[in-house]
Image (spheres, helix red, strand yellow):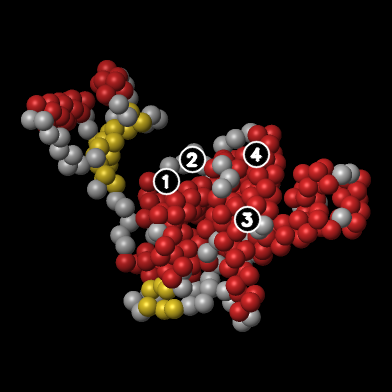
Amino acid sequence: MEYISEEILIQRLKARDKKVFQHFVNQYKDKLFRLAMGFVHDAFLAEDIVQDVFVKLWQNIDSWQEGRARLGTWLYKVTVNHSLNKVRDNKKTAHVQDIGQFVRQSNDGMIEIQIPDQTRDPHKALENKELAGILRRAINSLPRKQRIAFVLSKYQKMSSKEIAEVMELSVSNVDVIIHRAKKNLQKQILKLMR
Amino acid sequence: MNCHQVRNNLIFYYYGELEDYQMQQIKEHLQQCDLCRREYNKLALALDYAHKQSQMKAPSDIWQAISGRIDNTQPTKTRTVWLSAVQLIAAAAAIAIAILIGSLMGRTYVEQSYQIVSHQQLYEDYDSLVEAFTSFDQSVYIVLDK
């Protein structure tokens, strides 16, 4: 696959070049998956989010206007927003989440039951599930900006400058927000682990 | 460093974000203080798990799932209709009459959403629309969302 500029990439996507789209998906899928994981802490949910974001891009690429944010930045923003919406929606359906997270519908319509944690050690799986729950609650207890900045920093390994671009804030502001996020996160984690 | 100072900085110690001398002081404190060490170990356990999550990869078959979904859905089409100034005025008048009738009847029907767009600017409200009528040097077109 040759290197193509973003302008050409968008032209090819608008021309419905599926091969180029596949290459683009492969380039971003892991990054977006990790980003979504930082908010939802559930691999199935994170996968759904990533799928939704790419499908949305494919459906709406015709209305993409030059001069807007870079495509990568747009993907991160949409993934953050979609993840936060999923977290909000999941709070409403928390009572069915414990079962629901093990059940999914495959592409051919079959219902699959899967064990989300790949470890074969049940104690370890339980510990991981508890840790995921603690992280989810601790991170979701942070104010919105702190939550986003922390996840972009630690799950996406973004620099303050990159985070500033996604969040449309100054770099110094981002640094302050991340510092506060870490302090609050420590407090929340230790409170939840008492 | 005392316990209070150490506990205020545990997460920064975990991420190695302190000055060298502070890192050393906390390291030495944690070797001696059971309570602070216990707190640090709990925090490190959760943050190690977060780090593990941040290394995860998307399922290898995710492209197949996305490909299947985009094959089953049509792209969102927007139809762009260029209007002359006369047609624009007629369209706006029709919309205004429809709104007037709707409000008179105490009901509002929304059958189709309209976005009024100019070359550089999105006209979102009535005032901007009026402004568009008076600026005939600008080509104004309406995007009809399906």
Q: Amino acid at mark 4?
A: Ile
- Residue A2: give x, y in percent of width and height: 58, 62
Q: Gap in Å between the C-alphas at discs 3 and 4?
A: 22 Å
Mark 2 near mark 4, Cβ–Cβ under 8 Å?
A: no
Q: Residue at x 43, y 71 (%)?
A: A99
What count of labels does the image hold? 4
Mark 1 near mark 2, Cβ–Cβ under 8 Å?
A: yes
Q: What secondary structure is marked by label 4? A: helix
- Residue B132: give x, y in percent of width and height: 29, 23
Sequence-first disc among 4 and 1:
1
Sequence-first disc among 2 and 3:
2
Q: Residue at x 27, y 17 (%)?
A: B134
Q: What secondary structure is marked by label 3? A: helix
For label 4, the residue is A177
Frontmost of labels 4 and 1 is 4
Q: Amino acid at mark 2?
A: Arg
For label 3, the residue is A192
Q: Gap in Å between the C-alphas at discs 2 and 4?
A: 26 Å
Sequence-first disc among 2 and 4:
2
Sequence-first disc among 3 and 4:
4
Question: Is residue A24 visible in the rendered structure shown here?
Answer: no
Q: Amino acid at mark 3?
A: Leu
Q: Amino acid at mark 1?
A: Trp
Q: Is residue B2 left or right of residue B128?
A: right
